[in-house]
Image (tube, rainbow, N blue to C red):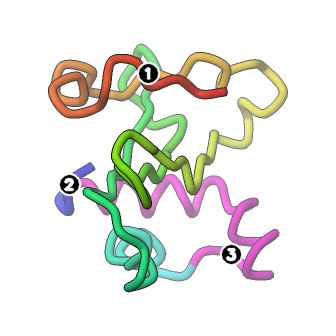
Amino acid sequence: MTEAELPQLQRFFEANPEYHLAVEGEPPGPGAAQEEYDAPLPPDWPFEKKWLLRFSDAQGQMIGMADLISDLFVDGVWHLGLFIVATPLHGRGTAAQPQPAEPQRASRSIPSDLALV
């Protein structure tokens, strides 16, 4: 995701507040998307890049998001730090085979052997 897409992420957080309610004890605030975008990793954690991924359905509606860190601690280790699926899709198997909203852009950067296990 780019910074220009943060309003969409903010709307997604507000429509699906369960993560924020469980972790922070309150719904996402008005700056939740910007905070997620700007959130640094600890300074002593070596990594290559932090990614925010948007997952969309066939109609282009955002149905999920993920925070992905490349080369965390060592080359080739990718860490999925946050993964949220839209609340109405919980329990439906939607998260089993996520596809980035822009696979052509993602495929140029994300390793082809990346798998969720």
Question: Is 7 placed left or right of 10 in the picture?
Answer: left
Determine the CA span between mark 2 and mark 1.
17 Å
Determine the CA span between mark 1 and mark 3.
27 Å
Which amino acid does the dot numbered 3 rest on?
A: Pro
Nearer to me, 115 or 94: 115
Q: Which residues are magenta?
A: 5-28
Which residue carries the number 2 mark? 2
The mark nearer the N terminus, 2 or 1, is 2
Q: Which mark is residue 40?
A: none
**Residue pictured at 60% horizontal, 55% vertical:** 15
Majority SS type along the magenta span = helix
**Residue pictured at 20% horizontal, 62% vertical:** 3
The mark nearer the N terminus, 1 or 3, is 3
Which amino acid does the dot numbered 1 rest on?
A: Gln
Nearer to me, 113 or 107: 113
Q: Position of residue 27 (x, y in %)?
A: 68, 75
Which residue carries the number 3 mark? 27
Dot 1, crowdedness within 10 Å: few (<14), some or many (≥20)? Answer: some
Q: Position of residue 40 (x, y in %)?
A: 38, 79
The mark nearer the N terminus, 3 or 2, is 2
Which residue carries the number 1 mark? 99
Classify the position of the C terminus by image quarter: top right
Question: Is 80 placed left or right of 24 in the picture?
Answer: left
Which amino acid does the dot numbered 2 rest on?
A: Thr
Element at label 2:
loop
